Each structure stands twice: as C-alpha cells, then as structure tokens.
Image (cartoon, rainbow, N blue to C red):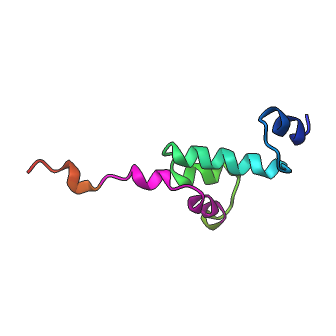
Amino acid sequence: MPSRFYAKKARIAQRVIPHMFLYSFATHLLERGTDLRYIQNLLGHGSARTTEIYTHITKIGIEKIVSPLEHLDI
C-alpha cells in the first residue's frame, strides 16, 4: 500500500513520504530506551553520525537518565 493510504488512516493531513515512517520508528525506539547502536544496526546505517540525527528529535530520553550517584547507598 502507498504511504498516503496509511497517512490518511492515521489522519495525518500533511504529505507523507515513506522515509517519515523510518524516522518515526527510530524515534520510538530511542524514546523507549533502545541503545543508539542497535538502532544504527537496524536501520542499516554504516555510521553512527547518520543515526545521531534521531537524537535531536526526542527529549523524552533525557528525562529517563539517572545519575550513577543515585544508586549509591549513602
């Protein structure tokens, strides 16, 4: 099925290209804590720099970071 079919089904009004689904997939993986190296492998990127473009898309991941000091029992 063409991407416009799925865009209409999802009620997305803007023009959708297939690459947007890839961005969305990678962003969701990143937000759920998947290591960037695994995402790089899944997407077939040869360079981590290519995959790093997804890191600026989400800010949810930053909220999940816990300092190693939080695990100290003092």
Asked if residue 47 is positioned above or below residue 59 in the image, the reply reads: below
Residue 43 location, x and y as percent?
69, 50
* In the image, farthest residue toward the left: 74
Q: Is residue 19 left or right of residue 54?
A: right
Q: Answer above or below: position of 56 versus 5.
A: below
Image location (x, y in percent) of residue 65 = 37, 53
x and y, in percent, of residue 39 in the image:
60, 50
Q: Nearer the viewer, residue 64 or 38?
A: 64
Residue 13 point in image, percent of width and height: 82, 45
At 62% across and 58% down in the image, what residue appears? 54
Displayed quadrant of residue 25: top right
Q: Residue at x 58, y 62 (%)?
A: 56
| Magenta-colored stretch includes residue 54 | yes
Q: Residue 36 falls in which quadrant of the image?
A: bottom right
Q: Main secondary structure of the magenta part?
A: helix
Q: Identify the magenta region.
A: 50-66
